[in-house]
Amino acid sequence: MNFSENNYPIVCFGEILWDVLPTGAVPGGAPMNVAYHLKKLGINPALITRVGLDDEGKKLIQLMERNEISTDFFQMDFELLTGKVNAKVELNHEVMYEIVKPVAWDNILWDESFESLLFNARYFVFGSLIARCEESRNTLYKLLEIAKYKVLDINLRSPHYTRKIIEKLLDNVTLLKLNLAELELITGWFTDFKNEIDRIRILQDKFHIPNIFVTKGSDGSLLIAEDLLFEHPGFRVEVKDTIGSGDASLAALIIKLIQGEHPARALEFSSALGALTATYSGGCPNYNPEEITNLINSQAIQST
């Protein structure tokens, strides 16, 4: 596909916020993280989101502008504050989140400009967290009616989801991304299968999902693409935190798949960017894309 044919070949929809860590606040929100990595890797994304009329919102807009990510589809909320998540990093590098509610991104309103944006876009990336409140959820449902290739990034944060809504979203998916814990939770609703491959297959069959991408932390990741299974063991790196690693992996996978890369190579590239992101603090590190190739090459050398 020639991406120059469209200013915004990929549209990301959902939350933009500040992750408040013990070391300070860093920009976050899965759709924003994906958009950030898409831009770093050479694709121009559109990001539909909403911020408050506060300093935190202004700083996020300025950050996007500095990284040359369009803010044309940012909405401003006159009542609700910009999103905030109080994050705590555990000893095993896992992150615990307290997601403030309600905030500006809970109130993304429908805009007529979205129709042509989605009609001309090739990919639509969204998460499950944005569906926690009615206004943004209704806007999402309208977008899903227009979108072509739909990429769902599951983000199950109790109490911000319900089984009914998650199952509705799963019915609208071309590519599903989730982690191993989320796979076990969701499939536990309707099966007692223990094997992860069996879990993926039944999820794929029940909701007619052609492509499923599962991240497994330090144990790597796997991809089922059109009934073929691909696995990658992951990369061994020194982890600072895992914030945004899954989002980075998803962005990398999307880019390689739409460039026509073989799924095994796409999964390798995806795993490398996810690991590289974990060596930095926060979900939007200032890395050089050459570092991804260097990491892949270094593992190839070590395995020979």
Image (spheres, rainbow, N blue to C red):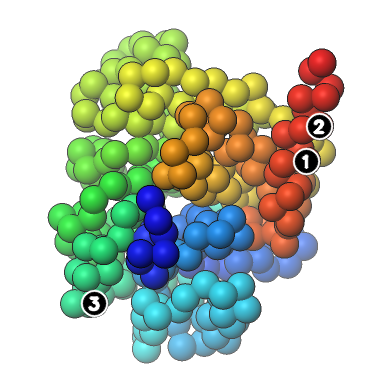
Q: Secondary structure at mark 2?
A: helix
User: What's the amino acid at mark 2?
Assistant: Ser
Image disc number at residue 249: none
Q: Where residue 7 sits in the image (x, y, percent)?
A: 39, 70
> Is disc 1 in contact with disc 2, using a CB cutoff of under 8 Å?
yes
Which label was assigned to residue 113?
Answer: 3
Would you call the spot at circle 1 few (<14 residues within 10 Å), some (14-19), or many (20 or more)?
few
Q: Amino acid at mark 1?
A: Asn
Q: From this viewpoint, is residue 280 visible?
A: yes
Distance between mark 1 and mark 2 Cα atoms: 6 Å
Q: Residues within 10 Å of mark 2 (few under 14, many from 20)?
A: few
- Identify the mark nearer the N-term, 3 or 1: 3
Q: Position of residue 242 (x, y in %)?
A: 66, 45
Q: Identify the mark nearer the N-term, 3 or 2.
A: 3
Q: Nearer the viewer, residue 36 or 109?
A: 36
Distance of mark 3 from mark 2, alpha carbons? 45 Å
Horizontal side of 149 relative to 285 (left or right) equals left
Q: Say what secondary structure mark 1 lies in.
A: helix
The three-letter amino acid code for the residue at tag 3 is Ser
Q: Which residue is tagged 1?
A: 294
Task: In the rendered structure, find residue 298 and report the number of the disc placed on it.
Answer: 2
Residue shown at the point (84%, 22%) measured from the top left:
302
In the rendered structure, the answer to whether residue 34 lies left or right of residue 175 reads right
Residue 201 vertical placement versus 88 (above, below): above
Q: In the image, what residue occupies the spot 70% across and 44% down?
A: 292
The residue located at (73%, 57%) in the rendering is: 287
Mark 3 to mark 1 CA distance (whole Å): 41 Å
In x, y percent, where is residue 279?
Answer: 76, 46
- Front tag of 3 and 1: 1
Picture quadrant of residue 193: top left
Q: Secondary structure at mark 3?
A: helix
